[in-house]
Amino acid sequence: MKTMKVSIFSYLIFTSLIAFAQPKEAVENWKGKKVLLIGAHPDDDHQSHGTLAMLNKNGNEIYILTMSTGNVGTKDTKLGKDDLAKIRRIEQLDAMKQIGLSEDRYINLGYDDGRLEFANKEEAIGKLVYYIRKLKPDVLMAFDPGYNYQVWHKSDHRAAAYLAADAVRAAEWPLMYEGHIIQDKLEAHVIPEFLFYGGNVSDKNTIVDITDFVDQRVNAGSKYVSQWTSGWNNYLGHDIENYPAAEKEKLFNKIKGRIKVIDGKFVERFRYHQGAPDSMGHGPRD
Ligand SMILES: [Zn+2]
């Protein structure tokens, strides 16, 4: 019984801390913010496409930064890495168009897919710091590096999670990557708010109602034909109409079926953090 009471007490403390971290202003009401999303692959932003479509419609300025070209993910032996990099770029830009974002909102750092963990870490962080200082985002969206413990992600995702977190911290110190300040005339920048995606459900503290943006998310997802259709094994071009007849409906149903539904509403869930980058991954400590 005592153990149960302690468990309930711990749960209440934990949930109140998580609840405390939620944005004062609901994400649905955000306006005029600059948002930078950092992902590893040209489809990592998809799980946030409803939120991004909504933020874009509400007058926020969205940028997508993808670290790799996505030039490895295929089972089609006819495709080489250069072919795939081009295909993934076109798919990414087509998907972004569906949520209202044009090519000038896209940055690709050009790293090889599947090997982000082996990229030169100082160089990769420097590139991220450069874009953070150049764009000066109010909000960073990134793979969740974890809350109190590291979150396991597959290889490029875990690299992107930690490279982004480390870059956020470095960007605030003018004597780190000081060439940006001295030569590029940029300023050190502190990102005040974070929406982490892809983390543990128990760490997520923010639910965004994307019901009105489901169609945009589904249409955006339908552009990834080289990944999410039989194009994975046998790529037949960008147009879904080139693929076997049932594919289109199957793809749309698959994409819609992946969206979380809570209380009859379609949602995307995040871990929100506000405050110093140093504390983005943990609660209060002594
Ligand atoms: Zn990915």
Image: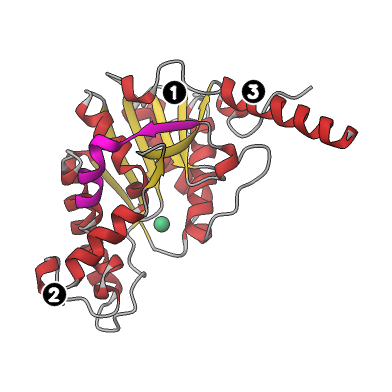
| Residue that lies at the very extreme toward the bottom in this rendered image | 77
Magenta span contains residue 103: no
Q: Look at the picture and state if 279 lies above or below 38.
A: above
Ligand number 1: quarter of image: bottom left
Q: Where is mark 3, residue-wise?
A: 16
Q: Nearer the viewer, residue 9 or 114?
A: 9
**Magenta segment boundaries in residue numbering:** 206-219
Is the Cβ of the residue at disc 3 closer than 8 Å to that at disc 2? no
> Which mark is in front, 1 or 3?
3
Q: Secondary structure at mark 1?
A: loop
Whether label 2 lies within 8 Å of ligand 1 gets the answer: no
Q: Residue at x 20, y 45 (%)?
A: 215
Residue denoted by label 2: 245
Which residue sits at x=32%, y=66%?
A: 71
Residue linked to disc 1: 188
**Which picture quadrant has residue 130?**
top left
**Sequence order check, earlier mark of 3 and 2:** 3
